[in-house]
Image (cartoon, rainbow, N blue to C red):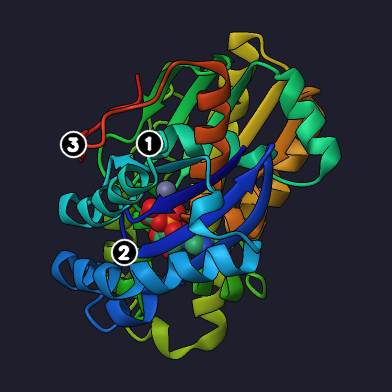
């Protein structure tokens, strides 16, 4: 089966062609530069960019895959959650294509696609994916922080989520307090590489609570007070690096400990992680070490597939089409507030 997938839930316009569990092409037009000057995603601008980029991105994905629209067997798009008007662009355009081609259309839950993104890769990974192993999955992005128990294929239960800010939001907001440009996560990661994570002590929110929830707004507030109480600190470049490393250490420790704890309690032998924050080097290193200590297998999404992309939408859509009766109407609506069950 050759399937075209589209993703426009936030600030990336993406299209991918997948075939038999393999990503043939995956084109992502990021709007980060555009939104950076406003310090965050501006929905109205995001929609205009999606409208501008949709056709060229789809055309490029088809060209790179060497297929024409008439050779497609199905079309998929993100149905939710996300920015309503941004979702509308991709969903309606994808449905129109499916209708014109008289091919099935599949609407995909964005977070469910993240759950499967750590298995996108070469042949050995595909074989592992075929066998499927129950796992606990960490989804960490600018908008979400979720711990999900994936019991079986297409069967999952949310164990916990953030009660306030998402982990990526915490990186971005504390970075803003330090005067770093949006999104600050990658820059904090870079600066932290030359900093001392034990230089300053910040709270590890909900670390010892008997639940799988997260809370990051208190950490952001404590960084604000710390900067108020240490005027001039931001003029010292080594102090900034130490501060970045210390904030990053607090966020990473909470994510790693709570993920591993949930996996052990649920009795699974595998942990996966995806979402933009999974690009973070400290998170990748610490989660790898913690899973090794706990005897858990770890699947981290490839860096290029951590942030939003249509490849993960396509991989899940193809699998659903082949194994369930998921196909939908050409006029199925967006679901901006869709929750993962
Ligand atoms: O998944 P994503 O592209 O978009 C959504 O939010 O859905 O994630 C973007 C988030 C931003 O908050 C960004 O700062 C964070 O991921 N991020 C990172 C790193 N790369 C991206 N955070 C920490 N370290 C990184 N290397
Ligand atoms: Zn996402």
* Residue 333 badge: 3
**Secondary-structure class at tag 2:** helix
Q: Which residue is mark 1?
A: 105
Q: Is residue 29 above or below residue 222?
A: below
Q: Is residue 108 left or right of residue 278?
A: left
Contact between marks 3 and 2 (CB within 8 A): the answer is no
User: Does the beta carbon at disc 3 come under 8 Å from ligand 2?
Assistant: no
Label 3, label 2: how far apart the Cα atoms are: 33 Å
Of 223 and 50, nearer the camera is: 50
Q: Is residue 232 left or right of residue 113?
A: left
Residue 103, how many percent across, how many down?
42, 38
**Viewer-proximal residue, 321 or 68?**
68
Query: Looking at the picture, how far across and down is residue 159, in whole percent?
Result: 43, 19
Position of 319 with respect to 34 (left or right) is right
Q: Can residue 108 be seen in the rendering of this structure?
A: yes
Residue at x 16%, y 55% (from the top left corner): 85
Which of the marked residues, 2 or 1, is nearer the chain's N terminus? 1
Alpha carbon separation for disc pair 3 and 1:
12 Å
Q: Quadrant of residue 215?
A: top left
């Amino acid at each position: 089966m050759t399937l075209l997938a589209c993703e426009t839930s936030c600030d990336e316009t993406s299209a991918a062609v997948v075939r038999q569990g393999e990503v043939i092409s995956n084109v992502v037009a990021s709007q980060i530069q555009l939104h950076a000057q406003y310090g965050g995603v501006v929905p109205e601008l995001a929609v205009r960019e999606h409208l501008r980029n949709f056709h060229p991105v789809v055309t490029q994905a088809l060209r790179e895959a060497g297929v024409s629209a008439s050779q497609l067997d199905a079309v998929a798009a993100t149905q939710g959650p996300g920015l309503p008007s941004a979702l509308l662009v991709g969903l309606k355009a994808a449905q129109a294509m499916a209708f014109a081609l008289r091919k099935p259309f599949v609407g995909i839950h964005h977070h469910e696609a993240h759950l499967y993104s750590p298995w996108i890769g070469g042949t050995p990974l595909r074989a592992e994916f075929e066998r499927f192993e129950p796992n606990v999955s960490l989804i960490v992005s600018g908008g979400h922080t979720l711990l999900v128990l994936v019991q079986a294929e297409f069967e999952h239960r949310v164990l916990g989520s953030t009660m306030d800010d998402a982990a990526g939001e915490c990186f971005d907001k504390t970075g803003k307090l330090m005067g770093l440009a949006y999104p600050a996560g990658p820059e904090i990661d870079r600066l932290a590489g030359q900093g001392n994570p034990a230089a300053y002590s910040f709270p590890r929110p909900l670390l010892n609570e008997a639940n799988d929830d997260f809370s990051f707004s208190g950490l952001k507030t404590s960084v604000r007070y710390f900067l108020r109480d240490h005027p001039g600190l931001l003029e010292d470049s080594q102090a900034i690096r130490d501060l970045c490393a210390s904030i990053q250490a607090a966020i990473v420790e909470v994510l790693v400990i709570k993920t591993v704890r949930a996996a052990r309690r649920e009795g699974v032998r595998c942990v996966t992680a995806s979402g933009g924050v999974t690009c973070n080097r400290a998170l990748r290193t610490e989660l790898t070490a913690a899973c090794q200590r706990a005897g858990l297998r770890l699947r981290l999404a490839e860096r290029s597939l951590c942030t939003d992309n249509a490849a993960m939408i396509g991989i899940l859509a193809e699998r659903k089409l082949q194994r369930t009766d998921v196909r939908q109407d050409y006029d199925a609506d967006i679901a901006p507030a869709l929750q993962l069950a």
